[in-house]
Amino acid sequence: MKKEILVANPEVMPEVVNSLMQFIMRYTPDKKMITLADDLLKCAKTDLAACKILYKERLFSQSTYHLQQAAEKASKVMFLNFGMFSKKDMRNISHNSLNGYLMLIDKMADYVGKIKKMYPDLKTDTADAQSISKDEKKRMELALTNYKGIKAMLKVFDDIKTAFKEKLNDVEGLLSPYSISKSLKNASKDTTFDSANKLLKGKSNSQILKKYYNPDSSMNFLYDSLDFCMLFIIASLTFPHEEYTRYPDKEIKPTNYTKNMGIVKATPEIITHLERIIKNMEKTYG
């Protein structure tokens, strides 16, 4: 099977940088939302601890429920720290983490549009995800994803890491189609990047990278930011299980959660990812 390669349009890069800068500056979480995010992060950590204990005791429906809860609360921590979500939004998301990510994409519509211009072949249509979110039959199919399918989805994270690592080894070549200083200047017309503009004004990419670019710290920052992708995958995989793990009135019942079920078999690997994500959240948001 031929691997698809996304080809970037470098002329759009300044627009992407500008949109991202505006996006970052536009949204700042207030103190109440930060406090709520902190509390949710503690709850996510507790849920994950409960998941591990219950899994060890082979109480698989209960461990899967707490796995879902940990992913849901960690996702809400990320949403709240973006500064675009209110308590009402949290209530509307409820246990359906996928809805939260769809809301985030909608709120980031301008930035997503610029990314689409940069990568014309990138699929940004959310119709499939919306269908899964609303259609019970599709939610059930997702809940019954086998272990091999879950492993393939989790592997996306490693594939993205590898691809970015290859690119960042030649960061100067990657940035060669545009000027960092000019892009920052364009991005900061309506914001507060004056000091950065003065610092970088007239300097070439090579000069800027030589003085300010640290490959190791940049790679670590990138990997941490990619946790967003992994958390989206985990939240999408686990959100249907909130309604199936607790009561026996659905087609999937708590007694169906055995070691042979895909989500149950993949739980130790998902726990490893969530532990890393929550630890990074504590460093970033704590």
Image (cartoon, rainbow, N blue to C red):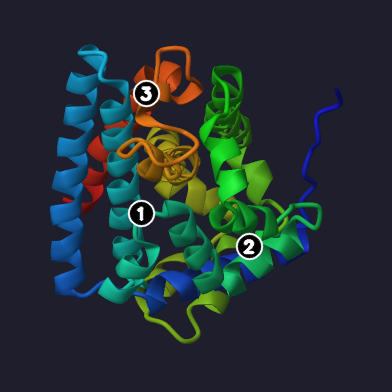
Name which of mark 1 and mark 3 comes first in the sequence. 1
Q: Which residue is mark 2?
A: 179
- Tell which of 59 and 272 is nearer to you: 59
Q: Quadrant of the N terminus?
A: top right
Identity of the residue drawn at 42% across and 47% down: 211
Q: CA distance from mark 2 to mark 3?
A: 59 Å
Identity of the residue drawn at 39% across and 26% down: 270
Identity of the residue drawn at 74% across and 52% down: 122
Name which of mark 1 and mark 2 comes first in the sequence. 1
- Say left or right for 24 vs 122: left
Q: Which residue is mark 1?
A: 95
Q: Are the residues tagged 1 and 2 within 8 Å (C-beta)?
A: no
- Tell which of 147 and 232 is nearer to you: 147
Instruction: Residue 197: give x, y in percent of width and height.
Output: 44, 73
Name which of mark 2 and mark 3 comes first in the sequence. 2
- Say left or right for 78 vs 146: left
SS assignment at label 1: loop
Q: Which mark is residue 233?
A: none
Instruction: Residue 43: give x, y in percent of width and height.
Output: 16, 46
Identity of the residue drawn at 38% across and 45% down: 243
Instruction: Residue 48: give x, y in percent of width and height.
Output: 23, 32
- Tell which of 89 and 282 is nearer to you: 89
1 or 3: mark nearer the eye: 3
Task: Indicate the amino acid at tag 1.
Answer: His
SS assignment at label 2: loop
1 or 2: mark nearer the eye: 1
Task: Indicate the amino acid at tag 3.
Answer: Thr
48 up-or-down from 113: above or below = above
The 10 Å Cα crowd at callout 3, few under 14, some 14 to 19, many 20 or more, is: some
Q: Which residue is mark 3?
A: 255
